[in-house]
């Protein structure tokens, strides 16, 4: 009797432990796995995680065999743990296989802002007193001034001229702050220094730099690069794009990365003739069109996020001259969550040649494409300053999503 009692006590303990373990696993997968997936027409959703299985549809009538073979179809799937415990229902979008050219070529950026960005506010000496008209008006660093007294502004000189010509009368500033439209009334004051009316504003209307092209789409000439947005150097705010040119670049030197100090690529614009146009500056990179593919390489399939695995991969990047070459890396971890559009990957440079040249990941390599098992899986975006051999990457699927949206918006504007 006592043996039987001990047996049931142990059994109860085991079942409790298994229930807790299963519950923890369900919670973990529910949180870490996305709610949306995309698969290529003719294939089914497959995941690499241990213990996971998939029922292709929750309601059989929702999907037919043809839906799995045709693009632009959607269906639902049930994620299961050990074929028994439901985790969650996800949506699956069936798409045509996307072929992109992995580039790894450097490109120059000349970007002009939509409005002007406030990068500083300053005191003005007037009648022997120090006054800050911009601060009094409620203007903040990072604000985008789109108009002065109803007149659109896109250049620093326009803002200065309109403020100076006010002769001290209040001017209305149309401002964009964190996607919110605001109005501020600024009263310029007469400067004791040069006798002109000033508003105490430091503004910026353009920027330039060097990055790396991630991919080129031969079907429509679209490209994606950087994998992160172009931000103002003073405010760290994303700069709103009005227009921009892509310029060819040659890499001329390298400052190797060291622990605690990021390295960088040095380069120069080959000329002032654009080889493409910028159409979007987003947190997940810059996008636009190129006149031609930057490299003669063949297009390869884009990997859906669930196809990306930890382990060996390659990055294509240019650290001398103008031609890219592959270098070995390791994908250490992957973040699949829907809400995470950047910093999806943690990667480590393992190639001794690249480590010898750059010390790892350096500024200017942002956008270098990551290829794994013959597919484009992502791009390098950031370096870990305390360990230049490691850094973040973005999933290629996230970049393609913005590229396709940008191309669609550009087509709609043109029509």
Image (tube, rainbow, N blue to C red):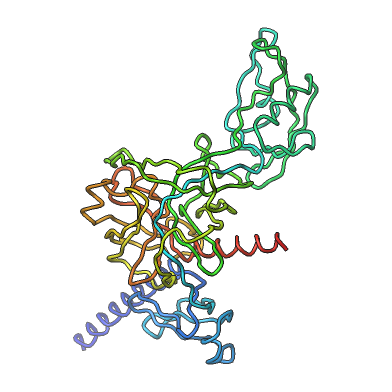
As rendered, which of 155 and 184 lies closer to the eye?
155
Picture residue at 62% right of the left edge, 47% below the top: 243
Q: Quadrant of the N terminus?
A: bottom left
Picture residue at 61% right of the left edge, 26% below the top: 121
Residue 211: % across, % down: 44, 48
Q: Residue furthest top?
A: 128
Picture residue at 43% right of the left edge, 73% below the top: 301
Decide if residue 404 is on the left or right side of residue 7.
right
As rendered, which of 273 and 167 lies closer to the eye?
273
Up-down relation of residue 262 to residue 323 (above or below): above
Residue 321: % across, % down: 34, 48
Q: Quadrant of residue 195?
A: top right
Decide if residue 312 is on the left or right side of residue 290.
left
Residue 346: % across, % down: 35, 57
Q: Residue furthest left?
A: 3
Decide if residue 120 is on the left or right side of residue 23.
right
As rendered, which of 409 and 74 lies closer to the eye?
409
State the count of labels.
0
Q: Quadrant of the C terminus?
A: bottom right
Up-down relation of residue 49 to residue 129 (above or below): below
Residue 283: % across, % down: 52, 52
């Amino acid at each position: 009797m006592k043996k039987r009692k001990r047996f049931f006590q142990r059994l109860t303990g085991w079942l409790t432990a298994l229930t807790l373990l299963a519950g923890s696993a369900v919670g973990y997968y529910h949180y870490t796995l996305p709610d949306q997936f995309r698969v290529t027409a003719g294939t089914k959703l497959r995941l690499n995680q241990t213990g996971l299985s998939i029922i292709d549809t929750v309601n059989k009538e929702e999907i037919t065999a043809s839906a799995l073979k045709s693009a632009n179809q959607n269906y639902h799937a049930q994620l299961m743990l050990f074929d028994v415990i439901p985790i969650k229902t996800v949506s699956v979008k069936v798409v045509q296989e996307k072929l992109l050219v992995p580039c790894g070529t450097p490109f120059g950026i000349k970007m002009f802002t939509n409005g002007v960005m406030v990068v500083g506010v300053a005191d003005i000496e007037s009648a022997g007193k120090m006054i800050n008209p911009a601060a009094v008006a409620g203007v903040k660093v990072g604000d985008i001034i789109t108009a002065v007294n109803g007149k659109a502004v896109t250049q620093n000189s326009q803002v200065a001229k309109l403020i100076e010509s006010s002769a001290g009368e209040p001017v209305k500033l149309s401002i964009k702050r964190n996607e919110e439209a605001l109005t501020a009334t600024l009263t310029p004051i007469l400067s004791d220094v040069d006798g002109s009316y000033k508003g105490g504003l430091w503004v910026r209307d353009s920027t330039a730099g060097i990055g790396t092209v991630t991919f080129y789409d031969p079907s429509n000439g679209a490209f994606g690069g950087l994998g992160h947005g172009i931000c103002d150097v003073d405010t760290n705010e994303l700069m709103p794009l009005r227009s921009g040119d892509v310029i060819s670049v040659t890499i001329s030197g390298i400052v190797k990365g060291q622990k605690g100090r990021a390295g960088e690529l040095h380069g120069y614009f080959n000329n002032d003739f654009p080889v493409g146009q910028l159409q979007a500056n987003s947190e997940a990179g810059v996008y636009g069109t190129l006149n031609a593919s930057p490299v003669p390489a063949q297009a390869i399939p884009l990997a859906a996020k669930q196809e990306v695995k930890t382990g060996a991969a390659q990055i294509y990047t240019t650290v001398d001259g103008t031609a890219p070459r592959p270098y070995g890396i390791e994908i250490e971890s992957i973040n699949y969550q829907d809400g995470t559009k950047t910093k999806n990957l943690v990667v480590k440079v393992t190639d001794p040649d690249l480590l010898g040249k750059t010390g790892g990941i350096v500024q200017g390599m942002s956008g270098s494409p990551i290829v794994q098992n013959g597919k484009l899986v992502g791009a390098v975006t950031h370096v870990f300053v305390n360990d230049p051999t490691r850094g973040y990457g973005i999933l290629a699927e996230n970049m393609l999503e913005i590229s396709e949206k940008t191309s669609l918006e550009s087509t709609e504007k043109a029509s």
